[in-house]
Image (spheres, rainbow, N blue to C red):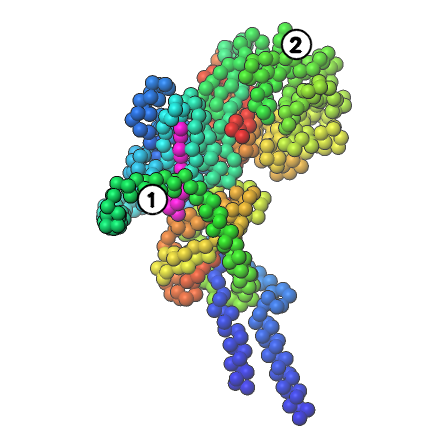
Amino acid sequence: MFLRYLFILLVILPIKAFALIEVDITRGNLNPLPIAVSPLSIDENSKNNFKKILKKENLGSEISAIVENNLRQSGLFNPLNKDAFLQKPEIANLKPRFEDWNLIKAQALVTGKVSLVDEKLRVEFRLWDVLAGKEMMALAFTTVPSNWRRVGHIITDKVYERLTGEKGYFDTRIIYVSEEGSKTNRIKKLAIMDQDGFNNKFLTLGNELVLTPRFSPTNQMVTYLSYFKNLPRVYLLDIETGMQEVVGDFPGMTFAPRFSPDGKKIIMSFAQGGNSDIYTMDLENRIVERITNHPSIDTSPSYSPDGKYITFNSDRSGYQQIYVMNSNGKNVKRISFGNGLYGTPVWSPRGDLIAFTKLHKGKFYIGVMRTDGTGERLLTENFYQEAPSWSPNGRVLIFYRETKTNSKGEGFSAKLWSIDLTGYNEKLVKTKTDASDPSWSSLLSN
Amino acid sequence: MNRNIIISFSFHSLLVIITAMSFPFLAKKPIDIPPVISVELIQITDKTSIPFAPKAKKIIEKVKEKEKKLVSEQAPPKMVKKEKPDAVPLPDEKIEKIKKIKDEKQNPKKVETEVKQVSEFEKKELFDTNSIAALIDKSKVDSAETNKKLDKITQDQDKSIDFSGLSLSEEDALKAQIFGCWSIPLGLPYNENLLVRIKLQLNPDGSIIRSEILDHARMNKPGQGFYKVLAESALRAVKLCQPLRVPSTGYERWKELQLNFDAKEMLEG
């Protein structure tokens, strides 16, 4: 009998021995990741040559400053102060002493080297995991020296992607409407710049009013609304060649254009006799197709990234609301049901959300909702703001905001702002002039 | 005789039943015990620094300042300690010297060997370490899978036999510490199943001997970029938190510990 109990005990005992304690970690801090961006090392010879070509004192520091600024702007990283760095760039690039970087609380480290090889700019960079003490990534780029800012952006994209798991959005450009002059006599020009505000370039002269520029997914073309000879029509502009043309031969006003995700079609509104409906035009064969047919005002169409659906706004219910339909115009469903008016719906490049502008009790909001209308979240509230545009990774929205004028009609300004999907990290996007109607390009280096 | 057979049969069947019950994976479903509600220890400063208690806030700030002063007074000796890493490279230099001496003995042409070393170094630089990591991971697939099986067993056992875990306060202390160290990568999607399980081997003082990601194979699969990012952040958290706040007794109980990192709650909110 005793032996039997002993046997039973022996069966149970070993199991107790391998019971492994598990602890569930369901929370953490949402502080930006501390990262050290060491200035890229550069040899004397290259330094002097670049000084002659680019008029930059130290190209290594300039490029690392771009990376640092981009990472800070993203709100996900906290680039540490260079003054605290103990190791020199030349040595850190070869073999970082992780204890030193650990001491200043860096969790990741970017090092690199800049050199001039055969009249070309060569940049090597490495990303290190300071706590694990290992290299996470090493890449080298060779390009013409004048491209040095883009190299900074590409490095940021790679670092961002490696540390967050999603693609970056730094090697991109933004097209917008540059505004100058008083509120009643505004001169509006199309302008294009790098995502960080540099390399600004004007695309039109400002003779006509221009509105709502939108990038093609291929980045070569821009579609926009221009009041040429006071007739508002949708135009197409090739950024590289400067060629412009009217889209379609409509007997009236066309507006709110946007490209389809494959870049082959333009979708827009066409107004006639107080009614506006949504049309598409194929850019290859110029065939025009009517998508909606309703006596109400249908406008601001935007395709889903797979091209199967279109979101738009319409006042068919009596108030302006957001709708989703199949790309052939069938199966129209209203998705916004909150209080207030909803407009400018834009489908996220990730496909999961629709960004919009909402007007409620005299305030303007930028918000997002799921594509079925659930989960509405308002990200920012202001006196006047509208026209959100997604970053290519679907994480950041850029939009514009106008300020109130005082009793004399002064103090008016329009500026670009960006905000994170979480509603945090609201940032002013610096432009030389006033700016409105921004549109974010897809990644240039793909 | 007949009676003996009945007794023998009943005892044997009892034995079988007991054995079967002690192997929970043989049972169809373990009994679902409702999860223990843990009371979390929140630092009072978080609660009292709300604007409705300005007096308390002032007092706390004073206390904080005092603490700061204390810290700054204690800091200098720490700095001295931390200079030690600077001295660490010495052994390497020694080894290099020894190597050089050896090289000299074997090869009178010293210059050539140095050149060779440099070229090897460059090769290392150009070599993609990720691809090596991928190869290692492939080899680890099998062991990782067996680990998974083992884990299932242990998980079920934890549910049915709950006598070897940490106490609530011990678990809370550990959790609170790791919550503070873990920077959740903010770009992760909130609707995907991203659970990273890390198995740790610990020293009695809470420092880590070994850390292993249990679903190691998933790290380098295509399309699992988010998982990899999360796993790396979890590893960083564990390393940053060293030594872990482990109970002062019962080393045998927690010398192996599994941490389940799940960011879902945070990313949804």
Q: Position of residue A340 (x, y in %)?
A: 64, 29
Q: Which residue lies at the image location 57% right of the left edge and 60% below the top edge?
A: B34
Reading the image, the residue beneath label 2 is A231
- Range of residues picked out in magenta: A122-135
Residue that carries the numbered disc 1 in the rendered image: A98
Q: Quadrant of the N terminus of chain B?
A: bottom right
Q: Residue at x 46, y 44 (%)?
A: B130
Q: Is residue A318 left or right of residue A385?
A: right
Nearer to us in this view, A229 or A240: A240
Seen in the picture, residue A24 relative to A52 is either above or below; the reply is below
Q: Chain of mark 1?
A: A
* Amino acid at the residue labelled 2: Leu
- Between B30 and A273, the one nearer to me in the picture: B30
Give how far across and how far down residue A416 sits, in percent. Answer: 50, 23
Query: Local crowd at mark 1 within 10 Å, few (<14), some, or many (≥20)?
Result: many
Residues flagged by tags 2 and 1 on a common chain: yes
Quadrant holding the C terminus of chain B: top right
Query: Which residue reaches farthest front?
Result: B108
Of residues A412 and A328, the one nearer the viewer is A328
